[in-house]
Image (tube, grey):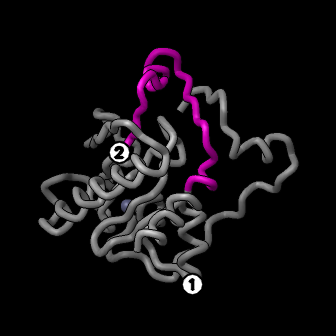
Amino acid sequence: MDEQRIWAPWRLGYIKGTEEPADPPPEPIQWQPGADHQCFLCRAAASYADDQEARRMNLVVDVGQHTLTLLNRYPYSNGHLLVAPLRHVGQLHELTDAEHLEAMQTLGRFSQLLGKLISAAGFNVGLNLGQVAGAGVPGHLHWHLVPRWPGDNNFMPTLAGVRMIPQSLEALWEAITEEQATNA
Ligand SMILES: [Zn+2]
């Protein structure tokens, strides 16, 4: 990951030395069966003594019966979400029907939510299967939900190695969590 970020407000406090580095994420009290303890998606899918605080630290915005949804810590655009099965599986054919169904429904629900919350005008929905296809975590598949706007700058990662991130992850986590509570 050698891309240069030109706007990363959530790190400014740390860079300026005005904020302590974030605490390491808490240790799970129970992992999902078959979890890989080195995998950040498995870590996000685990159970914690304080689930809400763990959700915040792992940037998790939703946990369903079979899938979880979290903010990508290294987003291509504002609101870039990841939807993954709770189980550590890397291939599409390994998913159960229930996991497929819930993943698609979740992508639908969050595209609607982001359309409303941050006025996303469109989305790229994608899956990188295997390292050669660009999967950062090839053992645990995940869909990317990348919001788009007219005239946005998403060409920049490919053209210039630069990403522009306009909103802090923490603020966005709060907003999405609140929006879901409102609609519950
Ligand atoms: Zn995993």
Q: Residues within 10 Å of mark 2 (few under 14, many from 20)?
A: many
Residue 152 among those drawn in magenta: yes
Which label belongs to residue 49? 1
| Label 1 vs 2, first from the N-terminus | 1
Secondary-structure class at tag 1: loop
Determine the residue positioned at 42% across, 50% down. Answer: 116
Residue extent of the magenta highlight: 145-172
Locate the C terminus by quadrant: bottom left
Q: Amino acid at mark 1?
A: Ala
Image-based side of 65 in relation to 45, left or right: left
Determine the residue positioned at 39% across, 46% down. Answer: 115
Q: Splitting the image into four quadrants, where does ligand 1 fall?
A: bottom left
Residue 171 screen position, x and y as percent: 63, 54
Determine the residue positioned at 66% across, 37% down. Answer: 8
Distance from disc 1 to disc 2, alpha carbons, whole Å, reads 28 Å
Q: From this viewpoint, is residue 37 visible?
A: no
